[in-house]
Image: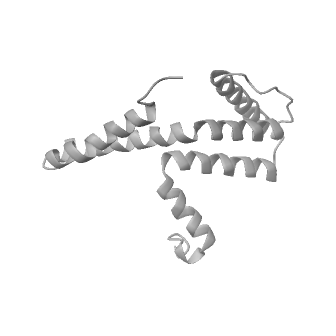
Amino acid sequence: MYDRPTAQELLDAARTHLETHVIPVIKGDRKLYFQTLVAINVLRIVERELGHYEAHLGAEWSRLRDLLQLDTPIPNNQRGFMTEVMAQNHLLAEAIRAGEYDSSQTLFDHLKATTIEQLEVANPLFLMKILAEINDPSLDAWSSR
């Protein structure tokens, strides 16, 4: 739809500039250094969100549709998709409050998948650590507490 540079390329250029040109200059100013690291992390999160957004939104919509047993047609645009997912999440929250999903493996699977997708965007290193701990309990720092 749009020409180049893409949003992804623009974010990458801004992040690369901060990492390669700004960080080395400001390392002596601890507050500015920290704030710049936070800004770089924000750019990385937005980059990952752009890369995963459509797939995650579609997967969540499908899971919610199955979980709530809805026959809602696929929205024809991204805003409609997001609005529908938000509405389905609201319905799910109401159903959970009403006790409709007590001890539901399907609900657990949906929440687990949604959390994994959120961590893929927000903090993939933490997700990798958690998945490694699940696969190898000896890596779990909390098990000995």
Q: Quadrant of residue 31?
A: top left
Name the residue: 69% across, 30% down. Answer: 85
Q: Position of residue 99 (x, y in %)?
A: 81, 41
In the shown orientation, is residue 60 left or right of residue 141? right
Q: Is residue 93 above or below residue 80?
A: below
Quadrant containing the N terminus in the rendered view: top right
Name the residue: 54% across, 57% down. Answer: 127
In the shown orientation, is residue 11 left or right of residue 28? right
Name the residue: 26% across, 40% down. Answer: 17
Q: Is residue 140 visible?
A: yes
In the shown orientation, is residue 5 left or right of residue 37? right
Q: Is residue 36 visible?
A: no
Q: Position of residue 21 (x, y in %)?
A: 20, 43
Q: Position of residue 72 (x, y in %)?
A: 82, 27
Residue 98 versus residue 58: which sits nearer the camera?
58
Name the residue: 45% across, 42% down. Answer: 45
Q: Quadrant of residue 18?
A: top left
Residue 65 versus residue 138: which sits nearer the camera?
65
Q: Is residue 36 above or below residue 126?
A: above
What residue occupies the far front of the structure in this picture? 3
Q: How many marks?
A: 0
- Its colouring scheme is one colour
Q: Position of residue 54 (x, y in %)?
A: 62, 36
